């Protein structure tokens, strides 16, 4: 893949008039919907339309595979894409926690899955908890994460114990 330096792009952009620059950005937004999503998230940070789109992508992966192998890259890509387009930290954390909720619900509905499934969901939970702590969102998510941890206790393969350890490590201080 060809890669331009930022300085080269800046030089090009500096040579454009305001109207040419606006036109270039509008053309990019038309050509690449993810850019339009980014601007939507910037201009309307409290709206949930973009968040809902990515939740549906994740939900579809869990609902279409009733006990079959899930396509983990699609789930992870949805989280990464939303994190790249959104400026709303609460919604980014919400999407990660939503993914873990889908994983726990999936297991409770269809029984034990496999080790890769539990590692993936645990990894997303840890990323979410780290993100929550790093962005000082503990108050907003402690109850949801606590409930999620409790609901995971009936799941085998040490998954529930791992969820409890992660919760304790990142949010355990909130229970005191």
Image: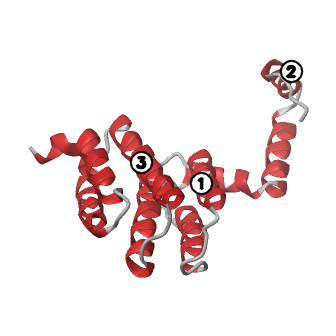
At horizontal 61% and vertical 56% (from top left) the residue drawn is 40
Disc 2 is placed on an element classified as helix
Residue at mark 3: 128
Residue 95 image offset from top left, x and y in percent: 47, 58
Image position of 131 with respect to 57: above or below = above
Q: CA distance from mark 3 to mark 1?
A: 12 Å
Residue 13 image offset from top left, x and y in percent: 84, 28
In which quadrant will I find the N terminus? top right
Image position of 21 with respect to 150: above or below = above
Q: Are marks 1 and 2 in contact (CB under 8 Å)?
A: no
At horizontal 46% and vertical 48% (from top left) the residue drawn is 123
At horizontal 31% and vertical 64% (from top left) the residue drawn is 152
Near mark 3 (Cα within 10 A), the count class, few <14, some 14-19 or many ≥20, is many
Q: Are marks 3 and 1 in contact (CB under 8 Å)?
A: no
Q: Is residue 173 left or right of residue 50?
A: left
Give me the disc on residue 8.
2
Q: Are marks 2 and 3 in contact (CB under 8 Å)?
A: no
Query: For residue 110, what is the image quadrant?
Result: bottom left
Disc 1 is placed on an element classified as helix
Task: Mark yes or no: residue 57 visible.
Answer: yes
Report the number of discs: 3
Query: For residue 34, what is the image quadrant?
Result: bottom right
Residue at mark 1: 76
Q: Nearer the viewer, residue 5 or 77?
A: 77
Nearer the observer, disc 2 or disc 3?
3
First in sequence: mark 3 vs mark 1: 1
């Amino acid at each position: 893949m060809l890669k331009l330096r930022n300085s080269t792009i800046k030089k090009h952009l500096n040579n454009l008039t305001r109207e040419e620059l606006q036109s270039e950005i509008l053309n990019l937004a038309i050509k690449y919907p993810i850019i339009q999503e980014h601007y939507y998230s910037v201009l309307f940070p409290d709206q949930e339309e973009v968040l809902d789109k990515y939740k549906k992508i994740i939900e579809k992966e869990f609902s279409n595979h009733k006990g079959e192998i899930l396509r983990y890259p699609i789930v992870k890509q949805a989280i990464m894409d939303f994190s790249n387009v959104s400026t709303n930290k609460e919604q980014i954390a919400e999407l990660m926690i939503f993914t873990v909720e889908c994983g726990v619900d999936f297991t409770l509905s269809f029984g034990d899955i496999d080790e890769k499934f539990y590692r993936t969901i645990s990894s997303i939970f840890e990323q979410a908890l780290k993100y929550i702590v790093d962005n000082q969102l503990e108050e907003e998510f402690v109850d949801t994460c606590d409930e999620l941890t409790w609901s995971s206790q009936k799941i085998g393969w040490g998954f529930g114990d791992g969820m409890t350890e992660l919760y304790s490590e990142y949010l355990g201080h909130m229970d005191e």
